[in-house]
């Protein structure tokens, strides 16, 4: 029996579930490994009989909390995909404000009627079995994960930093081009995608297991960033703080 | 072209596993299982006790595993594995007839000829007994070549005892002094209780004619080595086998390095005098 | 034998000729401050023979960052075959330090078991060296690699006006020159090259003892404070090991097709500075701390492999410290260790 797979979306742009849909050349092979049974972005059919639930988006309303708990009960494996689901990503930037203030900033006077809570990763609400970081997820990493699950192999996230992947790609360090980069502390696995295409790394996949954060704060300051700018580099994708919820 | 490149034999099959077939599966404990292999063409693995192979489960990966049987006429070889990761997990699911890939044997192994004529104290902690089984079987096959043989085997609880029948057989038929101990008292156990070092006081060792062969978890070594030294054994009479995560098995990839030593080439068998000055060893 | 000179036009002709015979890779300028890398030559005019150091060392053409070692099928039954790829290639414009490094890896990859993938690629490789003027991070003189007398087919010494004094290292090198117009070098030109050689050997960055004594200064230094001190800013990002011309560690990963029917095993550059490098199956990490990893890296280069193969496994190219964002410097580390041996205070790098 092929595993029955569902894709769910919470607070996000749904770009990660779109990434799955964009596996155009591989989707037929994927369909030989798993059966999709529920996926709003891709199909009309629906089912509650689920083996693997891929979830993108942060949990940011009371309703989200209720739904993700339901999903946890339905599915054998829950796998958050993408920065929003993995560590609350960009969404957690709102957590530094009061929720009333957030509602008013976004919706004006009518804001009070909206339900919102500080954004949190899926793992802050229910236990998860694995997670794919990134904004968006890396297509190949998703395919490897599906393949590994089909083979009965534990999927693994690389823990080497983006710097290491830049070197393997033969990239010139973006610091020599006048940019500032999170590569030395950022979790790799993306193949250093952004630096390979002329940009710098924003650590959208989170940090390595033991990042030398202090050293990197000093480095960024040595390269001319103010303390506030350093904080911005660190917090863009990685500001989620348990104590704020 | 550099001299080395001209004179060097390129080993084209260095990274190519040979297909080997599962001929038997014998679960040992809830966590450990023994799998017996044979090459389809009947070729012998050609290993020495204490050597290891790289076993490849197609699609899953490769892992270094000690061969736990002595060379035999049937040309089979045994691997006993604890379920720890993906490869060992897949090994637990193997059935007779399945095919895996094997590279090796690798490493130095125990120098069984150098041990001839000596008393042996074989000390295995937990799955440390696995590589030692190849030694014990070899000694049983060449029993007259060795003097007194003591086997000390410690494990946590009765259910974790491996090779139950063989242990009895080594005691009964092979003139070996087999002593077992479990860490904590257990209802289903009326034997010795206590960590493995508690078996040492009753042991009579004549240091110059004795070698200790010790394999166990890292924490065990320092205690057992202390006991061995208290009994008067010289550091080069204390032999151990170390575990590292070899990727290549042939001294290239660097993963198994302990200070200057490559476990895959210089080991996995070392004397304590080889490694006592290596701060990364144990 | 007469000393010969190849002019700017001749260098271009030489490259064009070599392009007929093999893939030619040479240093090219990259975007970014003082950045070069070895790339396949498409237009000989884009080659930049006057460069300080390439980002990645030329070892990538014999030991690619990722390469397939094995191809296998899972179904209907397991079968595997070696994948050993190589092609004729000419490395054009390699510095002495990098030539030394390639020879060092020949020694390591041929020792005990000959690595088929490295050897196959190296056997089809020809090398044209070029001299250099060190930058502020180089320390080749300290490693004795500012000049080399083997390991190349041709070696070009810059005369400063676009022409080069040519040294021939092998018969293959002599063949390369067939049909290329050369002229005899003048006494001034020979003197000019000698002067450049002297310049190269007189570098600012020195170690405070003879190179051959390096292993002695590492002896007994496992517990030195040097390691903690220099590791404080270390990211453990692996840059130093991955850009090192004499590092050759790798990991092996499995790739399986989505059909699950076939797969490959691939080796990728790995290094002892990366956190999980010394992890074993039970989860124990034998080099858990950054300082332990930094210590191992330096012991390996200047003590373990030095003792085993009789040469430092460091070519003094300075890539590690140049590309390290916090500039952790082997010269400073070595001089601290030497100072410790002498019981005094380091005089710095």
Image: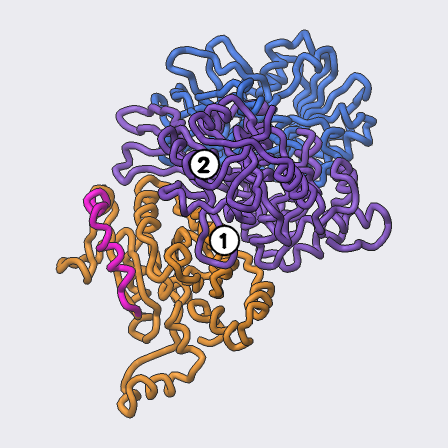
Earlier-in-chain disc, 2 versus 1: 2
Label 2, on which residue? C10
Q: From the image, which quarter does the N terminus of chain C lie in?
A: top right
> Are dots 2 and 1 on a single chain?
yes
For disc 2, the chain is C
Q: Dot 1: what SS?
A: strand
| Chain A, colour shown | orange
Q: Which residues are magenta?
A: A12-31
Q: Which mark is residue B171?
A: none
Instruction: Reply yes or no: does residue A28 show up in magenta.
Output: yes
Residue C306 seen anywhere in this rendered image of the structure: yes
Q: Is residue C254 left or right of residue B238?
A: left
Q: Quadrant of residue B177?
A: top right
How far apart are the alpha carbons under marks 2 and 1?
Answer: 26 Å
Q: Nearer the viewer, residue C196 or A160?
A: C196
> Which chain wears purple?
C
Q: Position of residue C152 (x, y in %)?
A: 55, 30
Q: Quadrant of residue C345?
A: bottom right
Q: With respect to residue A90, does A102 lie above or below?
A: below
Label 1, on which residue? C35
Q: Are marks 2 and 1 in contact (CB under 8 Å)?
A: no
Q: With respect to residue C100, does B104 lie above or below?
A: above
Q: Nearer the viewer, residue B249 or A4?
A: B249
Q: With respect to residue C31, does A68 lie above or below?
A: below
Q: Position of residue B59 (x, y in %)?
A: 36, 35
Q: Dot 2: what SS?
A: helix
Q: Position of residue C64 (x, y in %)?
A: 45, 38
Q: Quadrant of residue C325?
A: bottom right
Q: Position of residue C237 (x, y in %)?
A: 54, 53
> Which chain wears blue?
B
Q: Main secondary structure of the magenta part?
A: helix
């Amino acid at each position: 029996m092929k595993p029955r797979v569902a894709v769910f979306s919470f607070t996000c742009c749904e770009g990660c579930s779109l990434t799955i849909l964009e596996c155009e050349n591989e989707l037929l092979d994927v369909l030989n490994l798993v059966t999709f049974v529920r996926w709003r972005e891709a199909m009309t059919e629906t089912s509650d009989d689920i083996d693997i639930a891929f979830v993108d988006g942060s949990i940011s309303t009371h309703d989200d909390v209720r739904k993700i708990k339901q999903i946890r009960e339905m599915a054998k494996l829950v796998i958050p995909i993408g920065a929003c689901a993995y560590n609350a990503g960009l969404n957690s930037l709102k957590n530094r404000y009061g929720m009333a203030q957030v509602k008013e900033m976004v919706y004006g006077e009518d804001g009070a009627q909206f339900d919102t809570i500080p954004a949190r990763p899926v793992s802050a609400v229910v236990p998860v079995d694995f997670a794919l970081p990134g904004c968006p997820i890396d297509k190949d990493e998703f395919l490897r994960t599906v393949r590994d699950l089909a083979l009965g192999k534990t999927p693994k996230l690389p823990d080497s930093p983006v710097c290491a992947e830049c070197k393997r790609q033969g990239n010139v360090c973006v610091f020599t081009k006048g940019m500032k980069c999170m590569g030395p502390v950022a979790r790799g696995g993306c193949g250093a995608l952004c630096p390979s295409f002329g940009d710098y790394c924003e650590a959208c996949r989170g940090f390595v297991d033991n990042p030398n954060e202090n050293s990197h704060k000093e480095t960024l300051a040595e390269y001319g960033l103010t303390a506030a700018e350093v904080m911005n580099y660190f917090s863009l994708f990685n500001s989620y703080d348990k104590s704020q919820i | 072209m550099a001299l080395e490149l001209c004179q060097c034999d390129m080993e084209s099959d260095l990274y190519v596993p040979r297909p080997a077939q599962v001929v038997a599966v014998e679960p040992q404990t809830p966590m450990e299982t023994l799998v017996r292999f044979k090459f389809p063409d009947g070729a012998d693995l050609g290993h020495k006790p204490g050597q290891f192979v790289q076993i490849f489960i197609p699609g899953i990966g490769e892992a270094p595993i000690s061969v736990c049987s002595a060379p035999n006429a049937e040309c089979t070889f045994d691997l006993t594995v604890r379920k720890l990761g993906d490869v060992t997990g897949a090994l637990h699911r193997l059935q007779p007839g399945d095919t895996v890939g094997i590279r090796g044997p690798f490493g130095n192994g125990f120098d069984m000829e150098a041990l001839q004529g000596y008393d042996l104290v074989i000390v295995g902690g937990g799955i440390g007994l696995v590589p030692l089984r190849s030694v014990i079987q070899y000694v049983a096959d060449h029993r007259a070549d060795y003097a007194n043989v003591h086997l000390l085997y410690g494990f946590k609880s009765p259910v974790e005892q491996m090779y139950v029948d063989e242990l009895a057989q080594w005691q009964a038929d092979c003139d070996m002094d087999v002593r077992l101990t479990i860490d904590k008292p257990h209802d289903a156990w009326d034997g010795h209780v206590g960590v493995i070092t508690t078996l040492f006081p009753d042991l009579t060792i004549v240091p110059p004619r004795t070698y200790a062969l010790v394999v166990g978890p890292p924490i065990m070594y320092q205690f057992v080595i202390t006991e061995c030294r208290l009994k008067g054994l010289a550091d080069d009479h204390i032999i151990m086998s170390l575990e590292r995560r070899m990727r290549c098995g042939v001294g290239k990839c660097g993963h198994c390095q302990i200070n200057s030593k490559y476990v895959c080439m210089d080991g996995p068998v070392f004397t304590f005098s080889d490694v006592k000055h290596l701060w990364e060893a144990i | 034998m007469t000393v010969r000179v190849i002019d700017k036009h001749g260098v271009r002709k030489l490259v064009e000729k070599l392009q007929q015979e093999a893939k030619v890779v040479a240093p090219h300028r990259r975007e970014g401050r003082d950045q070069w890398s070895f790339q396949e030559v498409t237009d000989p005019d884009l080659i930049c023979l006057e460069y300080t150091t390439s980002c990645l060392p030329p070892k990538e053409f014999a030991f690619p960052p990722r390469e397939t070692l094995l191809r296998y099928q899972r179904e209907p039954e397991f079968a595997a075959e070696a994948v050993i790829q190589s092609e004729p290639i000419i490395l054009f414009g390699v510095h002495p330090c990098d030539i030394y490094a390639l020879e060092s890896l020949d020694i390591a990859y041929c020792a005990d078991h000959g690595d088929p993938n490295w050897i196959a690629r190296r056997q089809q490789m020809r090398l044209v060296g070029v001299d250099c003027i060190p930058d502020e991070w180089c320390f080749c003189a300290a490693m004795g690699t500012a000049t080399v007398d083997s390991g190349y087919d041709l070696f070009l010494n810059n005369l400063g006006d676009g022409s080069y004094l040519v040294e021939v290292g092998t018969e293959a090198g002599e063949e390369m020159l067939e049909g290329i117009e050369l002229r005899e070098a003048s006494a001034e030109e020979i003197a000019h090259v000698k002067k450049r050689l002297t310049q190269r050997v007189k570098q600012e960055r020195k170690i405070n003892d003879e190179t051959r004594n390096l292993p002695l200064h590492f002896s007994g230094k496992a517990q030195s404070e040097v390691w903690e001190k220099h590791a404080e800013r270390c990211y453990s990002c692996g840059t130093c090991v991955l850009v090192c011309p004499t590092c050759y560690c790798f990991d092996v990963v499995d790739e399986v097709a989505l059909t699950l029917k076939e797969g490959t095993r691939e080796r990728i550059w790995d290094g002892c500075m990366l956190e999980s490098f010394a992890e074993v199956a039970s989860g124990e990490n034998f080099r858990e701390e950054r300082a332990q990893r930094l210590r191992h890296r330096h012991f390996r280069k200047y003590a373990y492999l030095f003792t085993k193969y009789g040469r430092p496994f460091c070519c003094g190219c300075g890539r590690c410290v140049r590309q390290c964002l916090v500039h952790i410097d082997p010269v400073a580390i070595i001089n601290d260790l030497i100072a410790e041996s002498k019981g005094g205070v380091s005089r710095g790098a």
